[in-house]
Image (cartoon, rainbow, N blue to C red):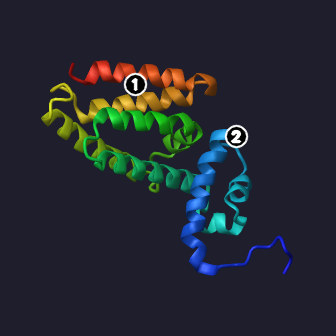
Amino acid sequence: MPENSKANRGPSAGPANRAALIKAAREVFAESGLDAPLSAVARRAGVGQGSLYRHFPDRIALGVAVFDDNIAQLEALAAASGSTLVDLFDGIAEQAMSSTALIELTSAARHDERAEHLASRMTTLVDALVIRDRASGRIREQVTTEDVMLAIGMLAFLLAKTDADDRAHVAERARGIFRMAFTEG
């Protein structure tokens, strides 16, 4: 076996390969945009293209997996003691700044059965925080889950259309508007 070849670990490598592909996709698409070759994702993940296509048969499947991972991170953030809707919005803004290409992909594929669950997962997450923050007086009484989902969608769309050098500034302004519109005090 040549020195540069990796030993085939078989099916046991599946979960690690999948995680590496999701991480690599996030990075490659942030750097090179949605049209980046999927071979670049496989290369960055340190796996062959066969592994990539075994886990993710197309670009949409890969994009959905990245967003599922993003939502899992947001769910963990929201589950933390003392976490607020503002914390969630800040986390979404951070993710959106580096996921603009994938925002466009999943938005275009929102009616694809593989992507439909993303909106319901986010709505469930936001709804729980709206209820919790309203009960604790951290947000205005009239704020609804639909209001927050609209703000998230507006932020994602705006960041996807903003030049990379301006995204942090735009996200910070959006965070300020969110706080003024939704929070008490």
Disc 2 target residue: 32
- At horizontal 58% and vertical 53% (from top left) the residue drawn is 23
- Is residue 37 positioned above or below 177 on the image? below
Report the side of 91 relative to 184 (left or right): right
Residue 41 percent across, percent down from the top left: 68, 54
Q: Label 1 to label 2, Cα distance in Å?
A: 26 Å
Residue under label 1, please give it: 175
* Residue under the image location 65 percent in, 79 percent down: 9
Horizontal and vertical percent for residue 182? 26, 24
Left or right, 175 with reference to 6: left
Q: Nearer the viewer, residue 176 or 101?
A: 176
Q: Is residue 135 left or right of residue 59?
A: left
Q: Position of residue 85 (x, y in %)?
A: 29, 35
Q: Given the image, on which type of amino acid does mark 1 rest? A: Arg
The first of marks 1 and 2 along the sequence is 2
> On the rendered image, what quadrant is the C terminus found in?
top left
**Above-or-below relation of 37 to 21:** above
Secondary structure category for the residue under label 1: helix
